[in-house]
Amino acid sequence: MRVPRNNLTFYDQQAPRWWEATATIAPLNRLNPLRFQYFDRAVPPWPGLRVLDVGCGGGFTCEFLAHRGAQVWGVDQSAQCIEAAQTHAEQQALGIHYHWGVAEALPFEAAMFDVVVCVDVLEHVVDPQRAVAEMSRVLRPGGIVCFDTINRTGRSRLVMIWLLENLLRQIPVGIHDWNKFITPEELRAMLNQSGFGSVTMAGFNLFGSTVAETLAAYRLYQSTGNFEARFDDDQRVMYIGTAIRL
């Protein structure tokens, strides 16, 4: 049977268990402290900033930012995830503003935000160029977009789909479509076309650059449930970056 690709129903299914420590989605929550080591280089102190999380899911990044003092909005196409995010934020007494919507048509006014965060999302949207344009629209001039996504290479197919999905089953089979992965050159062109400058990108290297490093990363995750990351020139699998709205 042919496995459907970019199968986003997984997120709807995970919504009721989103914040459980043993949920399939839980490892994503451990990436925020790592990725924000990179984002913090470009963003001024977070307290008081108006920040939008595009593709917020059940609220991992929104709550991470709220605890850092930001004013936070989250948007996602999954109504079930938005409901889970709202419920958990209320339980934590966090004033996060959640909305249903899609990245290609953000339900916000122009120039409303200081920062837009878009992580683990661009490889899933229907029209990434339109999504980038919408992020530009809702950012004020001088505002910053923070992103990470997956490159379209032979190594990304090997690691993200063959290894993590098909062999090890660490990621649900069908969650990714290799054809929707975006090269750094393609994303840089989208950003420039949508009014962004000062684009920075680096490898968001969770899996190492060799077979031995990949196996070591997997053993670390299996024994501790944690990841280690480095930001380097190896963008063959995941990469991370920022850009400024001109």
Image (cartoon, helix red, strand yellow):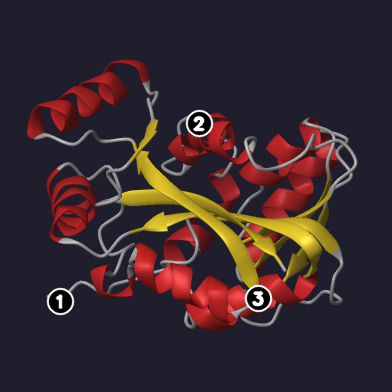
Residue plotted at (22% across, 52% down): 165
Q: Which residue bears the numbered disc 2?
A: 34
Q: Alpha-carbon neighbours of circle 1 within 10 Å: few (<14), some, or many (≥20)? A: few
Residue kind at label 2, given as amino acid type = Leu
Q: CA distance from mark 3 to mark 1?
A: 40 Å
* Residue hosting label 3: 195
Q: Which residue is mark 1?
A: 2
Q: Is 83 positioned to the left or the right of 230 in the image?
A: right
- Residue 179, compared with residue 19, is above or below; it is below
Q: Are marks 3 and 1 in contact (CB under 8 Å)?
A: no
Label 2 vs 3, first from the N-terminus: 2
160 versus 121 height, above or below: above
| Cα–Cα gap, marks 2 and 1 | 35 Å
The quadrant of the rendering that contains the C terminus is bottom right
The answer to which of 47 and 29 lies nearer the viewer is 47
Which is more foreground, mark 2 or mark 1? 2
